Amino acid sequence: MKYLLAIDAGTGSIRAVLFDTEGNQISIAQQEWHHLEEDGVPNSMSFDFTTNWELTKNVIHEAITKANINPDDILALSATSMREGIVLYDKEGKELWGVANVDARAGKEVAYLKEKFPGIEEAFYRISGQTFALGALPRLLWLKNHRPELYEKVASVSMIGDWVLAKLGGVIAVDPSNAGTTGIFSLQKRDWEPSMAEKTGLDPNIFPLCHECGTVIAHVTPEAARETRLSTKTKVVTGGGDVQLGSAGLGVVSEGDAAILGGSFWQQIVNIKSSITPPEDMSVRVNPHVIPGLSQAEGITFFSGLIMRWFRDAFCDAEKEEAQKRGIDTYAILEEKAKEVPVGSYGILPIFSDSMKYGKWYHAAPGFLNLSIDPAVCNKASMFRSLEENAAIVSKINLEKIEAFTGQKIDTLVFAGGASKGDLWCQILSDVTRCKLKIPKVTEATALGAAMSAGIGAGIYKDFEEAAKKLVSWEKEYKPDMQHHETYKTIRQKWEKAYKVQLKLVDENITNSMWKAPGL
């Protein structure tokens, strides 16, 4: 038997997932990691490549050990990661500096760019599909302004998944799907746009080769093999952004296909032709897909999975103990209890992620409205259900924005990621969106997409379309309850009105935004 290894560097964890060439998951190892704010740098989220490399080595070693296989039988590996997070290197390929995806330290730099170059964000967005909110340009400018001694040493930049591959194969390279999220990129050319950097006073010569996903760039180095149990025979293959590879792992490989990935963040995506220019109102994001000729219109719901983790860890010690005794996941216990709560969660309105407003993106202070002091009504179960309902409602709003831009009516959604494991959450999402939901048998679609990329590099699959036909199969389908759908329409209207009021409190400096794009 031969195998393919996927390494998934997510917002909240690093995972190594081993598949056979038929797409069966053989083993998985995972460790949570954290991105810390730098002392004296508000809104920063640094990527600790020293600690995180140790965690990466650990999960690779553990996945191989669990599978009890000969590492020589791993034909190829690839990596996927949170988009937007970047790592900078010196001319020897040594890491200098890194930030995770929602690092927002560069607010003054965003303001400077907009003031110094009127209309620049809109012009760059029409080329790249990205705004400055999570882009690399303001962050690079911040480094130039605040850490000039580091900036002067910068010779190359890559995404975090590419950093994993560079550590394993010794070659720094990127792919369109992830590099495109820097905003220094052309959707139509599917390559870097260094003139953007040059126009803003940054070095245009730091951009490495961009290869399509599935390209062999190296073999595992002897040093990496010693540290991870990998074999030097294993090919190192370009990967991609977590959402785009996750889409491939869901079979979302054709124009018009739509999906929701329910991980640390939730992404709502629809495949479109790469020749389509992003909308003038900057209402949605547009990214290169891992498939040549396709881009993806995307909405993002912030922190949906991380909010659930926070809720679990802050309030649910009893459920954790019960889950341990029963040998099931804590979230399964919470869903059991939430099923007893009626639709609408007794009117509780969570205030966390706003819907997608890519041109002016910030969120209200996190909280719950309409809490009751009646413990039979307001308790962990009802609050948990309200969070599930709210994630679905915000996703619905984002999907409507994508429909307005693309002109495509969405009636079927593929749903995957950790959230799709919850039977209640799946039904809620179907009810809210009024869509048929298809759940794949392999819910860890992002890792499967990375394995597909590795398989293309190894010659197992011709391309992602062939891999999807061979590997993607379906576990369940959900159909919407129209009575519940009508109830959720009313809840949505109340939530949208309430959220506007909560945003005004942020505007008036009464409450603190959960997250605010740089420059706002």
Image: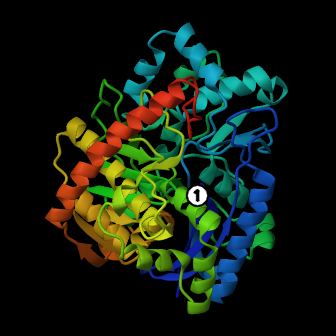
Residue for point 43% across, 54% down? 266
Image side of residue 390 versus residue 403, left or right: right
Q: Is residue 258 above or below residue 201?
A: below
The residue lying toward the viewer, choosing from 337 and 399, is 337
Q: Position of residue 127 (x, y in %)?
A: 40, 27
Q: Quadrant of the C terminus?
A: top right
Residue 286 image position (x, y, % from top left): 37, 38
| Residue 338: x %, y % from top left | 41, 72
Q: Say how many tags the image has.
A: 1
Q: Residue at the spot x=37%, y=44% of the render?
A: 299
Residue 96, percent from left and from top = 79, 40
Q: Amino acid at mark 1?
A: Gly
Is 338 on the left-hand or right-hand side of 153? left
Q: Is residue 143 visible?
A: yes
427 or 105, nearer to the observer: 427
Above or below residue 183? Residue 313 is: below
Local secondary structure at mark 1: loop
Q: Nearer the viewer, residue 355 or 247?
A: 355
Name the residue carrying label 1. Answer: 10
Residue 184, visible in the rendered structure: no
**Which residue is rendered at x = 66% and y = 86% of the image?**
66
Q: Give the residue at x 76% y 51%.
A: 49
Q: Residue 218 is drawn in which quadrant?
A: bottom right
